[in-house]
Every structure is written in C-alpha cells, then in structure tokens.
Image (cartoon, rainbow, N blue to C red):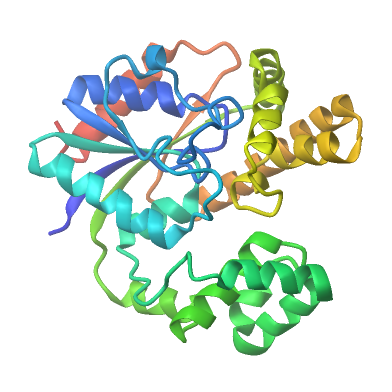
Amino acid sequence: MPEKLIVICGPTATGKTRLGVALAQRLDGEVVSADSMQVYRDMAIGTARPTAEEMAGVPHHMVGTVDPRENYSVARYVQEATGCVEDILRRGKRPILVGGTGLYIDGLCRGENYAGFQPDSGLRQALQARARAEGLDALWRALEEVDPETAARLHPHDEKRILRALEVWQATGKTISQHDRESRQRPPRYEKVAIALTYRDRQALYDRIDQRVDQMVARGLVEEVRGLLAAGVPLTGTAMQAIGYKELARALTQGGDVAAAIEEVKRRSRQYAKRQLSWFRRDPGTKWILLEKEQDFSSVIQDSTDYLREKGLP
C-alpha cells in the first residue's frame, strides 16, 4: 500500500499555509510546498511565500531554493519534492504537501517519471525564440500535429503549457498525453488525502484576492520586481511569467502605467483562482471546506483534523 500523503490545496488566498502549519504542529509534520513560483529565491512578496512568523517553527521545504534566472519544470519539482517527502518519512515525521499548483501535486502523488527530460537542455529557450519569431499559433499547430490530445485541452494562447508540451516531446520522444497514460497505468507513489479550501461565496474569494494584491504592493512588490530586473532575470524566463511579476515587469520596462498593471494583476489572479477551482474539483476524493467571509479558522483546523482521523491519519 502506498504511503498516505496529506495535501492542502485550493485557490490562492484561502489560508492553505495557515492550515498546513496548524496540521503540521498537531501531527509532528513538516510542510512541502507545492507552489510553482515559491521555489524561486528573491520572490517572496509576489508569491506570498510564508514568513518566518507564519511558518511558526515548522520546517518548510521547496521554498526559495532556485535562482530566478533558472527555468524550472514539473519534472524537476517531482524529483526534488519526492526526495523531501521521502526524507521526512525516514525521519518519522509526517509530510504535508501545501500549495495551489495542481500539476505539481498530481505529478508528485502519481510518481510521474519524466525519464530523459532535462529541463536545462536549451530546448525551452529555442522554443521561446521560435514563438517570438513565428508566433505562438505556429507552436500550437506544431503541438497539434504531434500531440492532438494535449493541444485540444490547451488554449492556443497558453504559452507556458504549449512550450512545456513541445519541450517534453522533443526531449523524451513521448508526448505528455503518453506520459499521462503510462502514469495512470502504474499505481500511485502516494495515496493522496486532499483537503481543499475555498470561500463559499465566489465574490468573497475575489475580494480576498484583491486585498492580498494590495497588501503585496504595500509590502514592496514593485520594488521586488525592479530588483529582479536589475539582477538580470530575463523577461522570458519562467520566474517572470508568474502573475504579478509579468505585468509589473512589462510596465516597468516599457514605460507602462504601474497602477493599471496592478489592476491587471488582480484580474489575472482572479482568473487563475477559477482555473485552480476547476483543476481541484476534478478529483471526487477531495474534501472541500467552504469558508465564510468572516471565518473562525479554528473550526477549519478541527474539521480537517477530524477528516484526517477518519482517513486513518493520527
């Protein structure tokens, strides 16, 4: 039987970090982040990386470990995060996976194997150059030829996923669709015990997201993006595709309106939350906790603890 792995997921700005820390304190656990952008150093504000105070002494892994000049990938995440989970288990602790990047969570729990895939091979840069020269539509059509199944699932303007799908195919000789089929035929590496948080009222979620963006700006998000640009982080790099960084970097380098960019960050963050909800709702085994606008969070912690006990977790 695979080891059970607690997963705290859901859209942005719903209290996942707070719940993960509280459960880690109760279960003698450690947190493994499942956030595709919190892995980067020097990007604490815009990724809502937990502060030392928020971590409350609980060890956090996969946070601030990667230079923002590097292109990161789900393949590398699965490899490195699996090492963290296994180390925690060997030490007799309880790993708790916390984050909103569904692709990373599913890849880790399933035990995806991207054999032969080297994310730093230069393929990503070559594909980005081709996208700039020929347009993203050309790359989407190229993907449609080699992997029509994946192309049908992606929006023709979803640059990040189109590039990743072509990159995996060129590097491994297998499409992402084939990788997915093969992984579904294997037993999962971990049995996912997932708890998802969201607000009962969608507008309350959107209001919370807008408030968080305002808080990020007040804490120095614009200055953080300026610092990354000054340090030579490329606009085309993976790190600069993060919501909040991409919009502000464009405004700062092209003489745009920073205030308008901040409003765009809010809009894109709300859109991202909708995609996260769609992703996590695909799994019928996920336990959803619906938050009220004024939430007594102690009840969320207790409900989560009770659910984990039902699942055989102390």
The answer to whether residue 59 is seen in the rendering is yes
- Report the front residue among 60 and 255: 255
Q: Residue at x 61, y 88 (%)?
A: 146
Q: Is residue 20 above or below residue 254?
A: above
Residue 111: x and y, percent? Answer: 30, 63
Q: Residue at x 39, y 54 (%)?
A: 77
Residue 169: x and y, percent? Answer: 52, 80
Residue 53: x and y, percent? Answer: 39, 11
- Report the front residue among 40 and 164: 40
Picture quarter with the C terminus: top left
- Report the front residue among 34 and 274: 34
Q: Is residue 34 above or below residue 284?
A: above
Left or right: where 36 falls relative to 223 = left
The answer to whether residue 202 is seen in the rendering is no
Residue 271: x and y, percent? Answer: 72, 42
Q: Residue at x 23, y 19 (%)?
A: 25
Picture quarter with the N terminus: bottom left
Q: Residue at x 57, y 73 (%)?
A: 123
Find the residue positioned furthest to the front: 231
- Quadrant of the rendered structure where residue 212 is? top right
- Report the front residue among 127 and 113: 127
Left or right: where 90 falls relative to 236 = left
Give the tally of numbered discs. Answer: 0
